[in-house]
Image: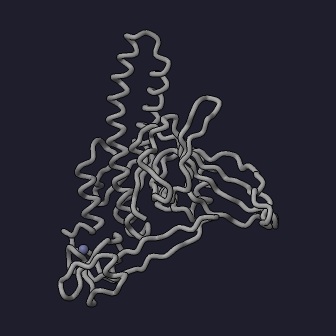
Amino acid sequence: MASKMPAAIDSNKRKITISMAESSDYESPLECEFCDAKVSFVNGFTREVGDNIISVNPYFRLKTSNTHGSECKYNVEGQVKVIVRESEGNVLTQTESGKFELRLLAVKKAIQELQDLAKKKKKGDSDNQKETKDKEYIKSGKRLGSYINSALRVLKVRSFCEENTDIENLLELVFDGVRLPWKDFYYEDKDFFRCYSNIRKATVTVPIAIIGVIKSIRVIDGKNGKFSVINLAGPYRKSDKKDTLDSVNVSIWSPDIDLFESYKVDDVLLAFGIFDAGEVSEKSNNSFTSSVKKFRNHDLRLWPISKSQLCKVNG
Ligand SMILES: [Zn+2]
């Protein structure tokens, strides 16, 4: 398994795009655009997530027991190697065994440091102090930005893969010397409930990645000013009560109301950082015709400190 691909080459050496494949305008067998691995076409489809119907775009996939050539741009190992080579600091490294490691403690520390600086910057008393704080903030911001950027680049590689297994043998996740399984770090919408309970029971907070489809982007006029909020489509789950459904709501918040302006509803968003899991809260269903009278909501929130904690990926 490996990356999902947007084009392929047919037996007449023609480049086949998604729309050509959809109208069966090609001669089998299909090959990768950049190497001789055999690929097949996967039609687009829709799936239900809670109240939302989400479309999954069509793509080309690697056929079973085929692998991309080592120089192919869809070779996952090759992609990770490039990112490791270009990354700064010790956030991504190669171990003695030749595998790669993403060091999550370094990322967590950088996030916390920047949050502290942002608070201090707000408090800054004299102008003189303010200038030093600003400089410190910009310097740390750059370092954090490059750490997050490296992490986000490997997450992007994962998002183009079909499963965790496509990357987990190659790239290990390490937090303070402990190895973390990818399933407890990278969550798709079907995993949101598990993500919630993992965060609730965790004694130490670890940065995680959440990928989902944007359901809404709003500006909320709160007590402490305006906030921009993104909500992701989340699944429902049957509860022990007949008239109550469990829901999970992932939201991303910012006091900078322009921060999310490059995103729109239905975009697939990858969000990385330290999420909070709030208490479960009950709310009644606005639809009176439904047999569901109440939702028991599980709230997951992220307050990104840097724009580089978010990126749009193709669904
Ligand atoms: Zn290839």
Q: Quadrant location of the C terminus?
A: bottom left
Q: Position of residue 60 (x, y in %)?
A: 34, 77
Q: Is residue 178 visible?
A: no
Q: Quadrant location of the N terminus?
A: bottom left
> For this rendering, which residue is in front, 8 or 286?
286
Q: Position of residue 304 (x, y in %)?
A: 48, 41
Q: Position of residue 261 (x, y in %)?
A: 44, 44
At horizontal 37% and vertical 74% (from top left) the residue drawn is: 59
At horizontal 27% and vertical 68% (from top left) the residue drawn is: 74
Residue 32 lies, with reference to residue 128, above or below; the image says below
Q: Is residue 3 visible?
A: yes
> For this rendering, which residue is in front, 249 or 137?
249
> For this rendering, which residue is in front, 237 or 208?
237
Residue 246 lies, with reference to residue 5, above or below; the image says above
Question: Residue 95 occupies which quadrant of the picture?
Answer: bottom left
At horizontal 32% and vertical 42% (from top left) the residue drawn is: 146
Residue 75 lies, with reference to residue 137, above or below; the image says below
Question: Residue 247 occupies which quadrant of the picture?
Answer: bottom right
At horizontal 43% and vertical 69% (from top left) the residue drawn is: 163
